[in-house]
Amino acid sequence: MNILVTGSNGQLGNEMRVLSSAHPNHQYFFTDVIEADGVSVLDITDKAAVSAYVSSNAIELIVNCAAYTNVDKAEEDEATALKINAEALGVLGAQGVRVVHVSTDYVFSGDEHVPCRETDPVAPRTAYGRTKYEGEKRLLAVCPEAVILRTAWLYSSFGNNFVKTMIRLGKERKELGVVFDQIGTPTYAADLAQAIFTVIESPVWRPGVYHFTNEGVCSWYDFTIAIHELTGIQKCQVRPILSEEYQYKTPRPHYSVLDKSKFKKTFNVTIPHWMDGLKRCVRRLDF
Ligand SMILES: NC(=O)c1ccc[n+]([C@@H]2O[C@H](COP(=O)([O-])OP(=O)(O)OC[C@H]3O[C@@H](n4cnc5c(N)ncnc54)[C@H](OP(=O)(O)O)[C@@H]3O)[C@@H](O)[C@H]2O)c1
């Protein structure tokens, strides 16, 4: 199959590139808004460029890893976030090919107390969440056969993320306050890339919205403790704090655990625990 991967310079896009070598039965077209080694330029908001790229390369499936992911900046520039996270989905979905798209736990309010199912009502509280939900709707309106994987708390050995920040701060500081009243599931982008290949290579195409994260739950505080333990950081004392002490620019969900039962049942897979994913990621990092 000819597979177009957008956003290939990002965390998930890079993990797709790594994992593609284990799936040599496909031909891959890795793209991003900025050119890089092995990555050609394709701006997903450029309708003419997307159509030309899909037809000239006989693309059969699009994996959309491109997004506007900066939650705070999206509040200040919702118009740009809307273009990339929503309008572009109408473009990608209209190409007449299969689409696997990635969405977020931010479509929910974060006020829940039990893991969210795909059928639960959405209530995004942020510009990022609103634009991502709008993207889901625009994609499904033109491509009802699309697969949408909602994920959360993504990290990788590629790009900047919470894991790398906590390693850096752990080395720089003697003391660090990290919130313990936000609960979720850290998700290794390599495991999400594996889930995307599970979808792509399923003998039967199974469209729909699915939730996918690693297994288990923790707070950002617990996650930091695990990161420091696994990287041998001992001199930094990590202190649990409340979200109100941290003074976020944009509200963060207090509870954003996703129920993955539908994905596991549909594709007959088990999902690694977040600690297992973290161990594998840490092995790939220099610290
Ligand atoms: N990160 C998380 O914690 C998290 C949580 C839940 C869901 N998700 C979702 O998971 C997916 C993957 O996230 P990620 O963390 O891998 O994101 P990421 O690291 O920010 O990567 C996104 C990539 O898309 C590129 N991009 C931006 N605008 C584009 C455009 N117009 N055309 C083509 N490429 C464009 C970005 O380039 P620039 O960097 O140059 O803009 C970047 O290389 C996204 O859909 C995200 O919404 C992420």
Image: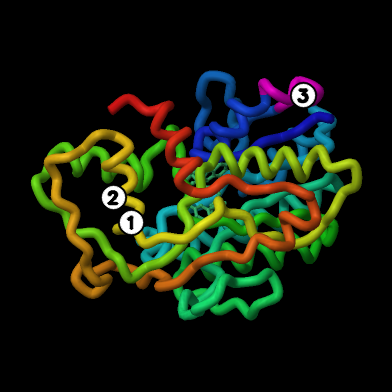
The prevailing secondary structure element of the residues shown in magenta is: loop
Quarter occupied by the C terminus: top left
Q: Nearer the viewer, residue 146 or 155?
A: 155
Tell me residue 172's x, y (percent).
Answer: 13, 39
Q: In the rendered structure, which amino acid carries the disc numbered 3?
A: Gln
Tell me residue 279's x, y (percent).
Answer: 43, 36
Residue receiving disc 3: 27
Q: Which residue is drawn at 23% across and 74% down?
A: 244
Residue receiving disc 2: 225
Q: Which of 257 and 226 is in front in this view?
A: 226
Q: In the rendered structure, which amino acid carries the disc numbered 2?
A: Ile
**In this rendering, position of residue 173 left or right of residue 90:** left
Q: N-terminal of the two: label 1 or label 3?
A: 3
The quadrant holding residue 143 is: bottom right
Residue receiving disc 1: 222
Magenta part of the chain: 21-28
Q: Can residue 208 be seen in this view?
A: yes
Q: Is residue 113 above or below residue 224?
A: below
What label does residue 261 carry, if any?
none
- SS at badge 3: strand
